[in-house]
Amino acid sequence: MISKEQIAADYQEIQDEICAALEHTDGIAKFEEEKWEREGGGGGRTRIIQNGDIFEKGGVNFSAVHGQLPDSMKRALQVDSDDFFATGVSIVIHPNHPMVPIIHMNIRYFEMPSTMGGNAKPIRWFGGGIDLTPHYVIAEDAQYFHKGLKDVCDAYYHDFYHRFKLWADDYFYVKHRNETRGIGGIFYDRLTANDELSWENIFDFSKALGRSFIPIYTELVNRNRIKEYTADQQQWQYQRRSRYTEFNLVYDAGTRFGLETNGRIESILMSLPPTAKWVYNYQPTAGSEEEKTLSLLKKGINWA
């Protein structure tokens, strides 16, 4: 049985790999690291990249925290135990170029001891996912992104991609705007071992998903970073960032979990963009690329 210590150690290794590759891709900016300790137990490594050649702001964070869950989180998770352990890597990258998409990834593990005593097994599960939020939806890029995720999923279980893609469509939905945050991706939670999947299989899948981040995202960055853009397109980027902000502050489960378990505020809110704009009652020009993008922010599109 894999231990929580091994899971945390492997997640730290993935954080290191991703940071090194993103620095290489940007070519200028370097990550700043801040190590922190959580008052209730555990801590993490917050790494932020800013003002780079292509990455305006981004974070690649690792945490491994433990302690006691507040009553509100016990109700939300439908558990009785107080003690918990959670570890994971969380990434959000905001590029400075409107043709380069925002990307988010999270891989995580959660564990609680059994409240029944005796030989009862602890509560434990893996979760995670990757989703893409283009400022302008480019069909070829969307297809490449989803094909990459499908390849990772198919290597571990035949229905992972289909199931987790539908889950992402539902999860990354901005209900008050009646639109998806972006073109989705995959999302899963409370994934546990069963007759067909061992804990080692699930952990390997989690790590493979984490390691798919760099080859997929660097390809999308390099495809688009040399394209010219206008001031109006930059303003559209800022407006699309506002939708990203709304989702993270209103709906994102990771944000809520961090805030309700006395997490580190700077690390939790690193997902927010450096600049965003809210334009009152914006209506795109008929036939424009902005109108086309809005028409594609919906559930159920089969990009793969």
Image: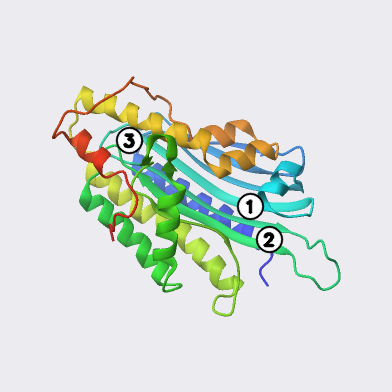
Kindly check if marks 2 and 1 are in contact, taking CB atoms under 8 A apart as contact.
yes
Q: Look at discs 3 and 1 and give the one toward the viewer.
A: 1
List the residue tagged with mark 2: 4
114 sits to left or right of 10: right
List the residue tagged with mark 1: 87
Q: Residues within 10 Å of mark 2 (few under 14, many from 20)?
A: some
**Residue drawn at the location 60% of the way across and 67% of the way down:** 192
Q: Nearer the viewer, residue 129 or 30?
A: 129
Q: Secondary structure at mark 1?
A: strand
Tell how many labels.
3
Kindly check if marks 3 and 1 are in contact, taking CB atoms under 8 A apart as contact.
no
Where residue 196 sits in the image (x, y, percent)?
Answer: 54, 79
Where residue 177 sits in the image (x, y, percent)?
Answer: 38, 35
Q: Quadrant of the N terminus?
A: bottom right
Q: Look at discs 2 and 3 and give the one toward the viewer.
A: 2
**Residue drawn at the location 78% of the way across and 54% of the way down:** 80
Q: Residues within 10 Å of mark 1 (few under 14, many from 20)?
A: many
250 sits to left or right of 178: right
List the residue tagged with mark 3: 54
Q: Secondary structure at mark 2?
A: helix
Q: Quadrant of residue 288?
A: top left
Q: Quadrant of residue 113?
A: bottom right
Q: CA distance from mark 2 to mark 1?
A: 8 Å
Who comes first in sequence, dot 2 or dot 3? 2
95 sits to left or right of 81: left
Amino acid type at circle 3 is: Ile
